[in-house]
Amino acid sequence: MLGANNGGTHLSGPVLIVGTGLLGASIGLGLKARGVDVVLTDISPSTQAVAEDIGAGRALNPVEAIDPELVVIAAPPDVAADLSAKALTEYPGAVVVDIASVKASVLDHLITVVDDAALSRYVGTHPMAGREKSGPVAASAELFTSMPWVVCATDHSTAVAIRTAEALAIDLGAVVARMSAEEHDQSVALISHLPQVLSSLVASRLQDSPPHALALAGNGLRDVTRIAASDPRLWVQILSANADRLVQILYGVREDLNRLIGTLENPTGAGSRLDMAQLISEGNVGQARIPGKHGTPPEAFARMTVLVDDVPGQIARLLTEIGDAGINLEDLRLEHSPGRQVGMAEISVVPGKRHDLLEFLTANGWKVVQ
Ligand SMILES: NC(=O)C1=CN([C@@H]2O[C@H](COP(=O)(O)OP(=O)(O)OC[C@H]3O[C@@H](n4cnc5c(N)ncnc54)[C@H](O)[C@@H]3O)[C@@H](O)[C@H]2O)C=CC1
Ligand SMILES: O=C(O)C(=O)Cc1ccc(O)cc1
């Protein structure tokens, strides 16, 4: 078991973060908020300066020797192995972790450039938390709270290295998931890389769509296309590194798509309606298996949508009143359509509280639509 030090963190620091974009700056902010000494470096001086300005850590001073407990490589996947190798050499007393979205290719490369002794201080990891935005401006200290953080120890990793890698995740409020690099890459092909490419494919259909069609867009389209706003430079690296595993899944998608096309070409033909029903039902089954955002069981929360006038202070009033009713809000999503005088707040509560909340809000004059 890990024991916390006097500061309440498992890490003592200093922690050196190489790459101070969205993830590096979020890690820096999270560790700094918990009192850990964080040192930052980025190949882009302006990116590093922004990360320092938002309070993610202090600049690495080239003339000051530091002896970090941990180096976190938070740079893009195609430089993660070389930067890990460099850190293992430069900081012989440090544990080195990378957080790249793919794990086997980084490990395979690293094994070719460092010896076993250096490799023993390296652990590949991947926080399963992020955003469709890049750069430190979008960073948040709480990005990792209750989210899974994959730790891929190898036969080479020392117990100290594994413990330190896990301490990083735990100190940032994440939940450690242990697996091999191969298991990780198989898993993320399905739960991260497939959604990304399908989201991009759907969104790319919108490029030349008429404005009157887009004006009708609702939550369904927004849900499916949010991650289509992701950074192409990062995703070229992720997709090429995991192409073998993703393409196997896409073969299956292609078969399903071909079948659906055949069905829709003859929608009244024998068996066509059954095929359509099957497609949607099979989707229902898969969707119901997705755990809640923070690892809670699927369908753990009941949802309702409250109409909120588009005037300042309304959301704050709604949240205060829910708090006053003694009901814990599990999730909140705000929706606002341009040109409308009303916003929508989708709120999630434990199912047992849904009825009480509905009655309470209605009695207080709120319009609950679902
Ligand atoms: N974006 C996301 O949601 C997630 C990303 N990741 C992984 O985290 C890593 C960082 O991703 P983001 O923070 O999103 O990207 P980002 O683009 O916001 O930040 C990457 C930073 O690395 C710096 N960098 C590039 N080459 C460097 C080098 N040779 N030395 C020092 N710094 C260098 C860049 O200047 C940039 O500031 C990637 O490996 C990515 O796969 C992991 C989980 C989620
Ligand atoms: O924005 C989201 O929901 C994401 O899923 C972002 C993301 C991107 C890359 C990762 O390796 C992990 C998470």
Image (cartoon, grey):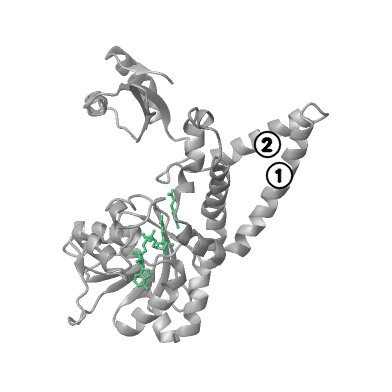
For image coordinates 62% across by 64% down, the residue present is 244
Name the mark on residue 256.
1
Q: Secondary structure at mark 1?
A: helix
Type of the residue with mark 1: Asp
Distance in Å between CA atoms under marks 2 and 1 = 9 Å
**Residue 316 placed where, x, y %?**
23, 29
Q: Using the image as rendered, state which of residue 303 and residue 258 is in the foreground.
A: 258
Q: Quadrant of the N terminus?
A: bottom left
Q: Residue at x 49, y 47 (%)?
A: 228
Give x and y (percent) for residue 9.
23, 61
Question: Looking at the image, is 229 positioned above or below residue 108?
Answer: above
Judging by the rendered image, the residue that carries numbered circle 2 is 279
Query: Which class describes the residues within 10 Å of circle 2: few (<14), some (14-19), or many (20+)?
Result: some
Measured as percent of width and height from the top left, residue 305 is found at 39, 24
Q: Pick the quarter of the image with the C terminus.
A: top left
Q: Nearer the viewer, residue 33 or 296?
A: 33
